[in-house]
Amino acid sequence: MTKKISDNQSGYSAIELVLLSVVVIVLASILISAYSGLKIRERNNTRIADVKTLELNLEIFYARSGFYPSLDEMNSPTWTSANIKQVPPSDLIDPGSKTNTQKFLQTSTKTNFGYNVTSSSGTTCNNKTVACNQYVLTAVLEGGSGTFKEKSLN
C-alpha cells in the first residue's frame, strides 16, 4: 500500500525558519559570552597567582641579600634567572601580553605587571648607590575587576 501525500502538506514556513534562526543565534551568543567570561577569569587568576609567587620569592631574595631588586634588574631575564630561580620565566610576563618579553613597568597596564620599587625613604633606588627596600607589585585585572596589589613586608 502506498500513501498519497496531500497537496496541503508542506515544509516549514518562512516565519518558523526565521524564529528558529533567531533562537540559534541567541543561544550561540550566550555560549560565546560565557566562554569569554571564563577566559577572563582564567587570565585574572593566573595574574594573581603569578604576583603572589613573585612576592614570595622577592621576600626570600630580600632575606638573603637585604634589598629588593631594582626595576632594571627585574627587567633583565639574565638577572632574574640567576637570582630568582624559583619563578618560571612565564610567571614574569602578564597573561594579556602579546609578546613573550619580560617587562615590568612602575605602574601596571593591561599587558604588563607593575613593579614600583623605592628606597626606605620612598625615593628612586638602583641598588648601586641607593638600596631598594620596599616595593608594590600590581596587576590590572580584566573585566573591570580593578587592580591586584601586593606590598613588600618592609
Image (cartoon, rainbow, N blue to C red):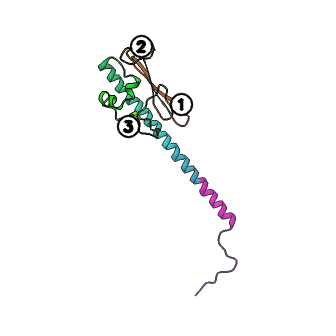
List the residue tagged with mark 2.
120
Q: Given the current orientation, which residue lies at the most extreme top position? A: 121
What's under tag 2, amino acid-wise?
A: Ser
Does the magenta portion include 122? no
Q: In this view, does 28 lie above or below 65?
A: below
Other-residue count near label 1 (Cα within 10 Å), few / some / many at <14 / 14–19 / ≥20? few
Q: Reading the chain from its start, which is encountered first: label 1 or label 2?
A: 2
Callout 3: helix, strand or loop?
helix
Q: Is residue 34 above or below residue 68?
A: below
Q: Position of residue 4 (x, y in %)?
A: 63, 84
Query: Foreground residue, 10 or 55?
Result: 55
Q: Reading the chain from its start, which is encountered first: label 3 or label 1?
A: 3
Other-residue count near label 3 (Cα within 10 Å), few / some / many at <14 / 14–19 / ≥20? few
List the residue tagged with mark 3.
90
Stretch in magenta: 5-26
Q: Quarter of the image for the N terminus: give it.
A: bottom right
Query: Residue 25 appears in which quarter of the rendering?
Result: bottom right
At horizontal 61% and vertical 84% (from top left) the residue drawn is 3
Q: Quarter of the image for the C terminus: give it.
A: top left
Does the magenta portion include 7? yes
User: How far separated are the C-alphas under marks 2 and 3?
Assistant: 30 Å
Q: Where is residue 82 in the image (x, y as percent from the top left)?
A: 29, 29
What's under tag 3, amino acid-wise?
A: Ser
- Mark in front: 3 vs 1: 3
Callout 1: helix, strand or loop?
loop
* 3 and 1 marks in contact (CB < 8 Å): no
Q: Is residue 75 above or below residue 34?
A: above
List the residue tagged with mark 1.
146
- Mark in front: 1 vs 2: 2
At horizontal 48% and vertical 43% (from top left) the residue drawn is 39
Callout 2: helix, strand or loop?
loop
